[in-house]
Structure formats: structure tokens, C-alpha cells
């Protein structure tokens, strides 16, 4: 082992990187201070804040972002999956311009909502009918509401550590800010525990809400058998199974439900499907969704001024029909698998406590020796290591978030991937010893 300088410890290295960052970004720092006067903490979307202050982004093109200090970054966050098509895809722009040309807020059904809904019903096996909303959060709210109305039962089950939107937050148990449904929490990838809870509460449990891969919790895939087991016990107990595929629907020709060959009763969608416009949808078996048929005397009303807004509908049609076809989805998922394996190999070659988790184009870099199969493993990671990664990669010109989550975008080139791999290798070479000491608990 090489002798290290006395000040080469995690806190001092981080402090130095943050100072360099602030000095390099005076306009972003000033903009942040200005924003703090009218937005709490200068922020209106918690995930975008990081210390010492976030970058203020001025624009984007393809897979490149530019901040107001004039730095350019290759984008590996991909707007947490919504930015799949990059920043300014000409076909998306043309679709939005065409929509604007036809007139907006027309207060009537339009042809594009029919076309987009038909495309989605064709793409996702579980969806016979669907309704549009505006965000993934709203999609989950509606899915849970639909399940409660359909079953006549009150309770919902989610999983410890999960994130299903700003009122469905289970990062540390049940958040007091959550929608006030009576809720119980299972343990992700612990089938026995989940089956026990579902059977015990079958009489009051309306639905189980689950991501077929946990996203925000750290790109934690469901283990084989877990989703199948949930499907079985839900059917047995008259409980609806809801797959939140807001992030994961891109991971095969028909989402992760197709990949795992499990058909949920309701699926929720969001993010990239609107081509970058605000988007959400919930859909499923006709028997459940037809509760919303306004021709029925007992119809459940479902409102939403912007549900069928023409910008989203037209951009969404182009997104699915021309850009992210089923074949592109399969190919891009394979490409993501290879990229994740390359990053893992770099860590393994150096025997470092670094684990990559994920499926296809969605992944997370973790500082751990244990395989990452539950949020409990992620909770043990020292958050300073994630900050170290973020500061080092930003300094190298790669836009990455504070959690180590990466969502690949279609416009990334082979050269972009190669450069990221090189920068990650340099990061590991430079800080590998610090990482291991911190993970193994022997850091100073
Ligand atoms: C799995 C999952 N569900 C729901 C949501 C909420 O979507 P939105 O931010 O559009 O409300 C998110 C957002 O990140 C998500 O990751």
C-alpha cells in the first residue's frame, strides 16, 4: 500500500472538490442564492438539489447540457429516465410545433389521444384500456384509487424503500407527507414476508403497488420468482397487483412485465412516453378501467384539464411510433447491459467495494461489497462516497446525480460511453483506496 498524504481523507478531499466546484461555477452559485429568495432552498424539485449548490442549466442539445457558466456536460442522468430522446430531438420538436399549429386547449377529444392510447395498449400486455394523467405521481394516485373502488377494500401495500411519486414515498418507512391511505410495507425481494402480509390482510387489502425494479431506491431488480410469487398470492387473495412502470417501461418491448412474463392488473406509466412533455397514464384490464366509462350510470368521474393536451399526445405518438419502437427498446436495453458490465469490470479488476446494479439502460453505482438486492444494502452506503463520485464526474464533464443513478439516453454515442468508462476508471484509480477504507470502516 502506498503512503498517503495526511490530508488525503474523505472529508478533506470532498471539501477540496467542492471548493473547486464553487470557484468554477460563480454564475450558478449566484443564481442559486437568488432563487433562494423565492423558492425554499432555491428549489422546486428536491432531487435536483445538491451541495454546495446545483448547476443552473441554460440549455441542452442531443446528449449535451450547458450550464450558465458555459460548461458543457455529457448527460448521464437523462432526466431520471424522462429524457430518453435527448434534449431537442428534431422529430419531437416537429411534433410539438405541429401541435401548437393546430391550436392548444381545444376542450374536446382529439385524434392524437386515441392514437397514443392504442399504441400503449398494443405495447403493454396488461393494458386493455387506459386513461391519461399528467405525471407518474398522479398515475399512481389514480391506480390506487381505481383499485380501492374496484375491490371495495381500503388498504394498500407498498415496499420499504420504494418511491412512487411525491405522495408515495417509503424511503424511510411511511412518510408523513404521503397520501393518507392505510398502508402496510413489505420487504422488497422477500416473498415470504410479502405473502404473509397479503394473506393476513386479504380482507382489507385493495392492492399491492410495486416497481418491477426499484428505481430511486438504487436500481434494485426484482429477483426471479418474487414478482411471480406476488402475482399468485394477489390472485389468490382478490388483491390487485399494480406495476409502477413509470421508469421501467423502457426496459423491453413491453416493459419489465414482458421481460418477467408477469401480467399485473394495473400498470402505471410516465416519464419518457410523452417525448419529454409532461406525461402519466394508468391502465389495465377493461373490467377495472371501465369503471371510468362516462356512459355508465355508476361511472367514476376522473377529471384533469391537461390529461389529453395535444403537445403530450402528439409528441408521445412520435416517441413510440418512430423513435422508441419495440425493437429499439430491446436493442437499447442490450446496449445498457454491456455498458453496466464494463463499469462493473473496472471495479472488479481493481477488487474495489463498488457494485453496479440495474437492468439495461438504467443502473446505479453503489459503494458496497455486498450485492445490492434490497434498499437495506443501499442505506449502509456512506453518502459522502456518492458526493465524491458526483463531484469527480462533474469535474470530468459528465452530468451525474447525487445518488449514483444513471439513465442512458438514445443520443449518447460510442465515444460518450468510452469517455465515461475512462473517467470512471480514473476515478477508481484516484480514490479507490479511500472508497475501500470507507466501506470497510477503516477510514480515518
Ligand atoms: C417509479 C416512479 N414512480 C412514480 C414517479 C413519479 O413520477 P412524476 O415525477 O412524473 O410524478 C417516479 C418519479 O421519479 C418514479 O420513479
Image (cartoon, helix red, strand yellow):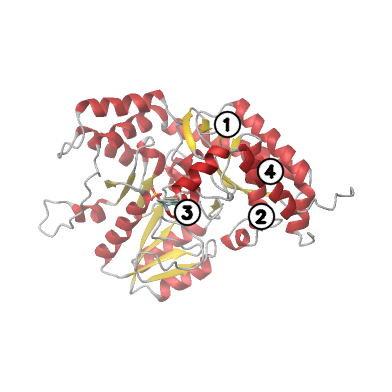
Q: Which residue is mark 3?
A: 41
Disc 1 and disc 2 in contact, CB within 8 angstroms? no
How far apart marks 4 and 1 lie (CA) works out to 28 Å
Give the side of residue 24 with respect to residue 99, left or right: right
Of the pair 70 and 299, the residue shown nearer to us:
70
- Few, some or many residues within 10 Å of mark 4 (<14, 14–19, 20+): some
Q: Which residue is mark 4?
A: 344
Give the side of residue 67 with respect to residue 136, left or right: right
Q: Earlier in the sequence, mark 3 or mark 2?
A: 3
Q: Which residue is mark 1?
A: 71
Q: Earlier in the sequence, mark 4 or mark 2?
A: 4
Observer-side mark, 4 or 3, equals: 3
- Few, some or many residues within 10 Å of mark 1 (<14, 14–19, 20+): some
How far apart marks 3 and 2 lie (CA) works out to 21 Å
**Residue at 58% in and 60% down:** 374
**Residue at 18% in and 58% down:** 300
Disc 4 and disc 1 in contact, CB within 8 angstroms? no
Observer-side mark, 4 or 1, equals: 1
Q: Earlier in the sequence, mark 4 or mark 3?
A: 3
Give the side of residue 16 with respect to residue 152, left or right: right
Give the side of residue 284 with respect to residue 347, left or right: left
Number of the label disc, if any, that sits on residue 355: none
Q: Earlier in the sequence, mark 4 or mark 1?
A: 1
Q: Is residue 366 visible?
A: no
Q: Which residue is mark 2?
A: 384
Q: Earlier in the sequence, mark 1 or mark 2?
A: 1
Of the pair 136 and 290, the residue shown nearer to us:
136
Of the pair 443 and 16, the residue shown nearer to us:
16
How far apart marks 1 and 2 lie (CA) works out to 24 Å
Amino acid at each position: 500500500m502506498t503512503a498517503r498524504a495526511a490530508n488525503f481523507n474523505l472529508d478533506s478531499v470532498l471539501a477540496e472538490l467542492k471548493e473547486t466546484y464553487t470557484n468554477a461555477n460563480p454564475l450558478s452559485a449566484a443564481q442559486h442564492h437568488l432563487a433562494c429568495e423565492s423558492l425554499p432552498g432555491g428549489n422546486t424539485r428536491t432531487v435536483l438539489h445538491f451541495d454546495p449548490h446545483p448547476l443552473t442549466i441554460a440549455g441542452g442539445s442531443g446528449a449535451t447540457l450547458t450550464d450558465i457558466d458555459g460548461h458543457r456536460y455529457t448527460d448521464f442522468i437523462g432526466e431520471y429516465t424522462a429524457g430518453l430522446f435527448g434534449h431537442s430531438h428534431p422529430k419531437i420538436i416537429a411534433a410539438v410545433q405541429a401541435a401548437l399549429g393546430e391550436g392548444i386547449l381545444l376542450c374536446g377529444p382529439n385524434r392524437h389521444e386515441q392514437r397514443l392510447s392504442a399504441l400503449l395498449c398494443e405495447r403493454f400486455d396488461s393494458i386493455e384500456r387506459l386513461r391519461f394523467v399528467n405525471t407518474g405521481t398522479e398515475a399512481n394516485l389514480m391506480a390506487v384509487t381505481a383499485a380501492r373502488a374496484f375491490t371495495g377494500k381500503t388498504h394498500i401495500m407498498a415496499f420499504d424503500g420504494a418511491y412512487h411519486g411525491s405522495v408515495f414515498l417509503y424511503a424511510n418507512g411511511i412518510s408523513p407527507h404521503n397520501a393518507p391511505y392505510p398502508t402496510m410495507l413489505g420487504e422488497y425481494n422477500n416473498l415470504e414476508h410479502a405473502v404473509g402480509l397479503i394473506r393476513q390482510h386479504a380482507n382489507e387489502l385493495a392492492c399491492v403497488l410495486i416497481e418491477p425494479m426499484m428505481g430511486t431506491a438504487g436500481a434494485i431488480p426484482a429477483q426471479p420468482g418474487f414478482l411471480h410469487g406476488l402475482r399468485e398470492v394477489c390472485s389468490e387473495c382478490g388483491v390487485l397487483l399494480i406495476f409502477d412502470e413509470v421508469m421501467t417501461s423502457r426496459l423491453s418491448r413491453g416493459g419489465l412485465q414482458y421481460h418477467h412474463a408477469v401480467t399485473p392488473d394495473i400498470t402505471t406509466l410516465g416519464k419518457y412516453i410523452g417525448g419529454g412533455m409532461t406525461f402519466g397514464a394508468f391502465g389495465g384490464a377493461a373490467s377495472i378501467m371501465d369503471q371510468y366509462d362516462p356512459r355508465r350510470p355508476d361511472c367514476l368521474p376522473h377529471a384533469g384539464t391537461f390529461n389529453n393536451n395535444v403537445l403530450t399526445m402528439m409528441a408521445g405518438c412520435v416517441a413510440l411510433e418512430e423513435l422508441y419502437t419495440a425493437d429499439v427498446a430491446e436493442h437499447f436495453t442490450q446496449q445498457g447491459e454491456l455498458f453496466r458490465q464494463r463499469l462493473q469490470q473496472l471495479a472488479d479488476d481493481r477488487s474495489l467495494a463498488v457494485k453496479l446494479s440495474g437492468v439495461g439502460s438504467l443502473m446505479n453505482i453503489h459503494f458496497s461489497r455486498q450485492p445490492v438486492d434490497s434498499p437495506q444494502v443501499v442505506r449502509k452506503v456512506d453518502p459522502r462516497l456518492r458526493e465524491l463520485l458526483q463531484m469527480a464526474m462533474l469535474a470530468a464533464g459528465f452530468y451525474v446525480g447525487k445518488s449514483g443513478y444513471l439513465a442512458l439516453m438514445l443520443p449518447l454515442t460510442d465515444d460518450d460511453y468510452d469517455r465515461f468508462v475512462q473517467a470512471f476508471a480514473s476515478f477508481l484509480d484516484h480514490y479507490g483506496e479511500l472508497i475501500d477504507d470507507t466501506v470497510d470502516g477503516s477510514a480515518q
